[in-house]
Amino acid sequence: MNCNDILPSLRARKLSCRFGARVAVDGLDLDLHPGEVLGLLGPNGAGKSTTMQMLSGNLAPYSGRVEICGVDLSEQPEAAKTHLGYLPEIPPLYRELKVSEFLRFVARLHRVSKADLDAAVRQAMQRCSLGEVAQRLIGNLSKGYRQRVGIAQAIVHNPSVIILDEPTAGLDPLQIREIRELIGELGRTHSVILSTHILAEAEALCDQVLILNQGRTMFSGGMDDLCQQWQEDGPRAGAGNGLEEMFVRLTHQESPR
């Protein structure tokens, strides 16, 4: 399920979301191409999770549109979602199932053919290093392994676009390193959106960054563009590195509503 390498694998235009009078996301534009990892950054309440829910088709936007591999997510949701894998902040796992059983179930939900089912599950487990726990109940796994199962369910149908919401939250340092290595590997063959509070993680993994504050896009572009802007604006004595300092500057421009 691969996109055309020329066109964006994911495109959002004028994407907005309101909850009553509160604007959660305001006119977001986004282009993500094959082989790119985009870091979605912002303080708590910036609109990151709302954005990811709209991009994944789990929340209807107030206005705007999303295309996955050229397919409009609102007009053809089933067709668009065949190209999409999503790991929410809390992985959607069935703790009473074995790992292999759960991944087979998810693959069938994504309409992986019977002929390809075993190979799809085997490849997802291999990429996520789940072979040794394939026959264990998900409820008996460590949090690190449950995160791996969560990523495996997002990639078992080999989607072009993978959306990961805080995939390393709550993990120990070794588990964080393993998940980061996995995300880096996925980013070479897929388009990945990564929401994270860990700026070092974004610097290590991401080609592009999108910084939100109070639902508004404060910066969107490549890491090189952000570093150049940091140099042009002038580093401040005692401040952090380029991404950290620019993040602080951009997300403190306005007081909370």
Image (spheres, rainbow, N blue to C red):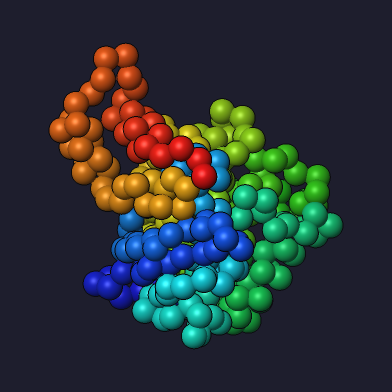
Q: Residue at x 81, y 45 (%)?
A: 140
Residue 61 % position (x, y): 52, 70
Residue 242 % position (x, y): 29, 30
Residue 141 sits in quarter: top right
Q: Residue furthest right?
A: 96
Compared to residue 94, the image places residue 256 above or below, namely above
Q: Residue at x 42, y 48 (%)?
A: 212
Q: Residue at x 25, y 40 (%)?
A: 226
Residue 28 sits in quarter: bottom left
Residue 45 % position (x, y): 55, 45
Residue in front for this viewpoint, 152 or 75: 75
Compared to residue 97, the image places residue 136 above or below, namely above
Residue 96 % position (x, y): 84, 57
The answer to whether residue 22 is left or right of residue 108 is left
Is there any visible trace of residue 177 in the rendered image? yes
Number of numbered discs visible in the structure rendering: 0
Residue in front for this viewpoint, 126 or 148: 148
Residue in front for this viewpoint, 26 or 187: 26
The answer to whether residue 254 is left or right of residue 52 is left
Is there any visible trace of residue 185 in the rendered image? no
Q: Residue furthest bottom?
A: 75
Q: Residue at x 70, y 40 (%)?
A: 143
Q: Residue furthest left?
A: 232
Compared to residue 122, the image places residue 127 above or below, namely above
Compared to residue 254, the image places residue 86 above or below, namely below
Residue in front for this viewpoint, 100 or 218: 218
Location of the N terminus by quadrant is bottom left
